[in-house]
Amino acid sequence: MSEKMRGELETARIRGKRTWLAVILAFLGITGAFIFLHLNSPNVEERLATINADRAIPDSQNAAVIYNLLLEDPNVASLGYLPEFIDVNSDGQTLLQPWLEKDYPEVAAWIEEYRWLIDKLIEASHFEKCHFPLVADWYDSTRSTQLSIVRRWAFLIKRASNNDIAENRNEDAIAKCKCLIRMGEHFRQQSMLIEYLNGIAIESLGLNQMIVLIMEGNIDESHLQEIELILMRTRNNWVTAMDRIEHVEELVQWKFKEQLGLIGRLKYKLRYGLFGKKRKYNGFETLQKQI
């Protein structure tokens, strides 16, 4: 056999070894990835059930019972940000500053239609605690879409409180401001980040309304003392909340990843799982400290 033929055979033998080595490494990589993804997969439903049990409170103490009844009411679901017949100017004037019924009778009539809803939300504000049960498929459930309805509640109350301030109904205005602050607190007690952030936004609406009431309302010393007691209860619990939220968000993400194939789960892990946790919360913590 010539030197050339021996060289070609040796080259073919080396290529064959490399091919088999690549196949073995690929097999080991896929197997390792499968084991890594599945052995580390928690029992999401079981863990969330444990969290729900630990956080459970009696219905008689739970504001979520009232919120859920309202969210299931088709009359509430149809509540818009503002009726179509109200123009843009009326929208801004009634939402951002005190206004008189004689100047905007249609807005006043619309608010009166939902007086019962405002009363129920004020009733919910008398509860200190609020616990919505956690579900594994949170982002596919109605809970995520219902947050937009809750935000419309907040704007309805803010608009109504502006009318109370202008008409010198101080006790009613204070009750609505308190309602917004408590509603914000209720949603800050939940375990999904988007709920917590919505809670911060709603609570801020209530605090801003307090400022409007103090600056433009006809209030006396007794009203100021009442407002002071309300504000003394507001507190920053960002770090504690993030400990709870981070764990629940991770479980909900696991449930989402279970719907993906092996390659999809690997991509998700590489994209969000290695450093995403620190990026996700450190920025919000810095923002909260600045606030």
Image: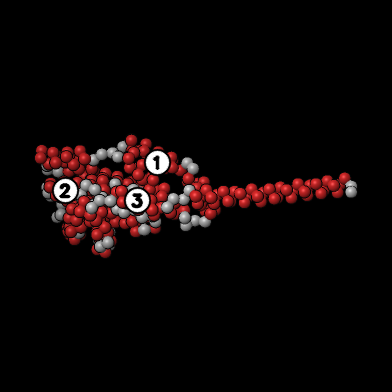
The kind of secondary structure element at disc 3 is helix
The amino acid beneath tag 3 is Thr
- Residues packed near mark 1 inside 10 Å, few (<14), some (14 to 19) or many (20 plus): some
Q: Position of residue 171 (x, y in %)?
A: 12, 47
* Residue 101 is at least partly visible in this image: yes
Residue at which label 1 appears: 281
Q: Nearer the viewer, mark 3 or mark 1?
A: 3
Q: Position of residue 209 (x, y in %)?
A: 21, 45
- Residues packed near mark 2 inside 10 Å, few (<14), some (14 to 19) or many (20 plus): some
First-in-chain label (2 vs 1): 2
> In the rendered structure, are the residues bearing label 2 and label 1 in contact, judged by CB atoms less than 8 Å apart?
no
Residue at which label 3 appears: 50
Mark pair 2, 1: CA separation: 34 Å
Q: Nearer the viewer, mark 2 or mark 1?
A: 1
Mark pair 2, 3: CA separation: 36 Å
- What residue is drawn where x is 43% and y is 42%? 277
The amino acid beneath tag 1 is Tyr
> In the rendered structure, are the residues bearing label 3 and label 1 in contact, judged by CB atoms less than 8 Å apart?
no
Residue at which label 2 appears: 175
Q: Quadrant of residue 153?
A: bottom left
